[in-house]
Image: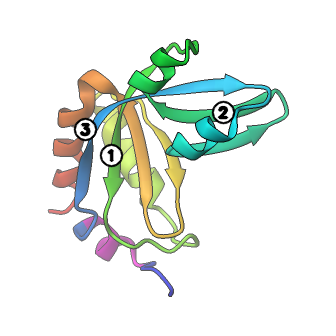
């Protein structure tokens, strides 16, 4: 199933959703299967595995983290080859002094912003639809 590639359509239909909870980025050389299964995202880097985990789980496991994030999902089905979507929302957030960390899934783009900026980031993203 192919996603949307037209930037104007993507921005109008982005419909950002603020997922409940707090999320943290942790790095481990060899994460357990339990942590891998609990992660909302993972990236294998040369230095180790980065896992995005619910903060409460990271704390329970005694894992170190330095950044507490809000997780926003753009509910529009964006094509992985779409051009300009990441630039549009990253630029809009930057104009409001909100940093973002972006991960693309097959169907949706996921944006992690500092937790205290979650609601403001959703408001900024919603304004892109107009």
Residue displayed at 31% across by 64% down: 75
Residue 61 magenta = no
In this rendering, which labeled residue sits more in front, label 1 or label 3?
Answer: 1
Which residue shows up at 75% across the image and 41% down it? 44
Q: CA distance from mark 1 to mark 3?
A: 8 Å
Colouring style: rainbow
Residue picked out by circle 3: 121
Image marks 2 and 3: residues in contact by CB distance under 8 Å: no
Give coordinates of residue 56: x percent, y percent. Answer: 39, 23
- Helix, strand, or loop for circle 2? strand
Q: x, y (%) of residue 39?
A: 54, 41
Task: Point out the stretch of residues depicted in magenta.
Answer: 6-11
Task: Name the spot of residue 95 as percent of width and height, x first.
Answer: 31, 34
Q: Is residue 7 magenta?
A: yes
Q: Quadrant of residue 27?
A: top right
Give residue 33's quadrant in the image.
top right
Circle nearer the N terminus (2, 1): 2
Main secondary-structure element of the magenta-colored stretch:
helix
Image position of 17 with respect to 115: above or below: below
- Horizontal side of 100 relative to 26 (left or right) equals left
Question: Which label lies toward us, 2 or 3?
Answer: 2
Mark 1 = which residue? Answer: 72
Looking at the picture, does residue 57 appear above or below residue 109?
A: above
Decide which of 93, 76 is in the foreground and name it. Answer: 76
Residue at 45% x, 78% y is 5
Residue highlighted by disc 2: 50
The reply to whether the C-beta atoms of the residues labelled 1 and 3 are less than 8 Å apart is yes
Compute the Cα span from label 2 to label 3. 24 Å
- Residue shown at 38% from the left, 71% from the top: 7
In the rendered structure, which disc, 2 or 3, sits on the residue that comes first in sequence?
2
């Amino acid at each position: 199933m192919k996603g949307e590639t037209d930037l104007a359509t993507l921005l109008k239909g982005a419909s950002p959703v603020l997922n409940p909870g707090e999320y943290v980025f942790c790095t481990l050389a060899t994460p357990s299967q339990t942590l891998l299964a609990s992660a909302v995202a993972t990236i294998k880097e040369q230095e180790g595995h980065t896992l995005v985990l619910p903060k409460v789980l990271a704390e329970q496991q005694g894992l170190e983290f330095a950044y507490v994030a809000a997780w926003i999902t753009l509910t529009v089905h964006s094509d992985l080859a779409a051009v300009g979507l990441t630039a549009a929302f990253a630029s809009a957030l930057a104009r409001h002094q909100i940093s973002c960390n972006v991960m693309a899934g097959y169907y949706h783009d996921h944006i992690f912003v500092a937790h205290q900026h979650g609601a403001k980031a959703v408001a900024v993203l919603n304004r892109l639809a107009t």
